[in-house]
Image (cartoon, rainbow, N blue to C red):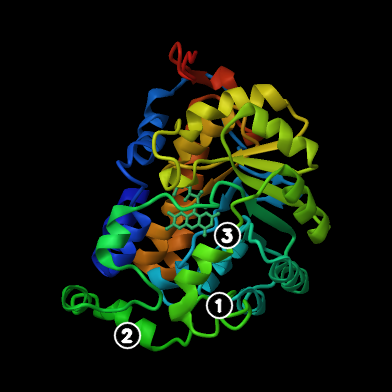
Amino acid sequence: MPVITCIDDLKQLHKRRTPKMFYDYAESGSYTEQTFRNNTSDFAELLLRQKVAVDMSGRTTESTLIGEKVAMPVALAPVGLTGMQSADGEIKAARAAEKFGVPYTLSTMSICSIEDVAAHTSKPFWFQVYTLKDDDFMRRLFERARAANCSAIVITVDLQIMGQRHKDLKNGLSAPPKFTLKSMANLATKWAWGLEMLGTKRRFFGNIVGHAKGVSDPSSLSSWTAEAFDLTLDWKRIAKFKEMWGGKVILKGVMDAEDARNAMSVGADAIVVSNHGGRQLDGALSSIRALPAIVDAVGDKIEVHMDSGIRSGQDVLKALAMGAKGTMIGRSYIYGLGAMGEAGVTKALEVIQKELSTSMALCGERDVKNLGRHNLLIPKGFEGDWQ
Ligand SMILES: Cc1cc2nc3c(=O)[nH]c(=O)nc-3n(C[C@H](O)[C@H](O)[C@H](O)COP(=O)(O)O)c2cc1C
């Protein structure tokens, strides 16, 4: 068993153990990948303010997110095809999150279905929806999420149309994978992944196939996706989805102060400042740079969470100090899952919590809820001085 000390160790193992098609699917951004890269490198521009001779005993990373108690303010972000990184991946990730005490968000485009994840967990999880044209399908998705006892819906508002990821096209990404000679050669070196995958029946899009009209066969899914997403989405329609669901709503993919105010006016309980991990609008600002202006615009009238680029507990600390109430991690736990299954997701969470707690101590903070801009050295012009 290799010694895992940081998220990058999990990433190296993930790369070694998972077919290239799926590792590349996770480790890519759209087009030139500028925003994907900046999401992580901009965190390094923010520095932490060291404080000494401050009582650092009895530290806590506990907090609340949309009224739910959490062991640390870090939720697992919705990630499509998680069950292709490791067999039954959504169930494994949800169980790891539940045991750790952080929220898990199941993607619409998951391999394990809502019902399957609910059957293998005991606490409510969050369910992410894409906004589709078909109201009947949306209504049924909400009903299924209610029946599965989901405690919140995460509506993703930044993917009506997909940013292109070159690697996915070149690799012929699909679920289940369609193998070419080249990908078969790669697969031959990933026998442990293959054996696990042979042992599960969950290899299709569990929330879609057999539930959406005209998608009884997974090969028609790509055409369904292209047709199903609602290009006419506006704030009125988002308000309608909130009404259809009738429970807590988190809007994910807000990068602009005016959009954040609109999210408030449709009654969202929280927003996630997110550029989808650099997978949508290439050329957009990194999330950590976009965060402060949004926090300043909405104050504490709505909970602000953020994701994109978090690879350590220090990054979580910086996001919270910049004013986020919570964070989400995507790739950081996917690396863990691809590396070591459920134990790897747990490891990713442990690594991040330990880094967060240690860095809090060295910043002279004992309670994660007290982090603020006073903990940071923020370079002049960090947010950008745009015309
Ligand atoms: C492989 C992959 C698949 C994703 N699938 C979804 C999805 O189905 N729905 C969604 O709202 N966001 C999706 N996202 C975006 C994540 O929820 C999250 O915003 C992003 O991963 C955060 O950036 P990070 O990976 O740098 O932490 C996906 C991200 C990745 C890396």
Looking at the rendered image, the disc whose residue lies closer to the viewer, 1 or 3, is 3
Q: Does the residue tagged 1 have its C-beta within 8 Å of any atom of ligand 1?
A: no
Q: Does the residue tagged 3 have its C-beta within 8 Å of any atom of ligand 1?
A: no
Residue 108 can be seen in this image: yes
Left or right of 92 in this view: 39: left
Q: Quadrant of residue 379?
A: top left
Q: Estimate the spatial distance between the alpha carbons at disc 1 and disc 2, rounded to whole Å.
A: 20 Å
Looking at the rendered image, the disc whose residue lies closer to the viewer, 1 or 2, is 1
Residue at 47% x, 70% y: name it. Answer: 223
SS under mark 1: loop
Number of numbered discs on residues? 3
SS under mark 3: loop
Looking at the rendered image, the disc whose residue lies closer to the viewer, 2 or 3, is 3
Task: Residue under label 3, please give it.
Answer: 229
SS under mark 2: helix
Nearer-N-terminus badge (1/3): 1
Q: Amino acid at mark 2?
A: Leu
Q: Where residue 92 appears, x then y in whole percent? A: 51, 71
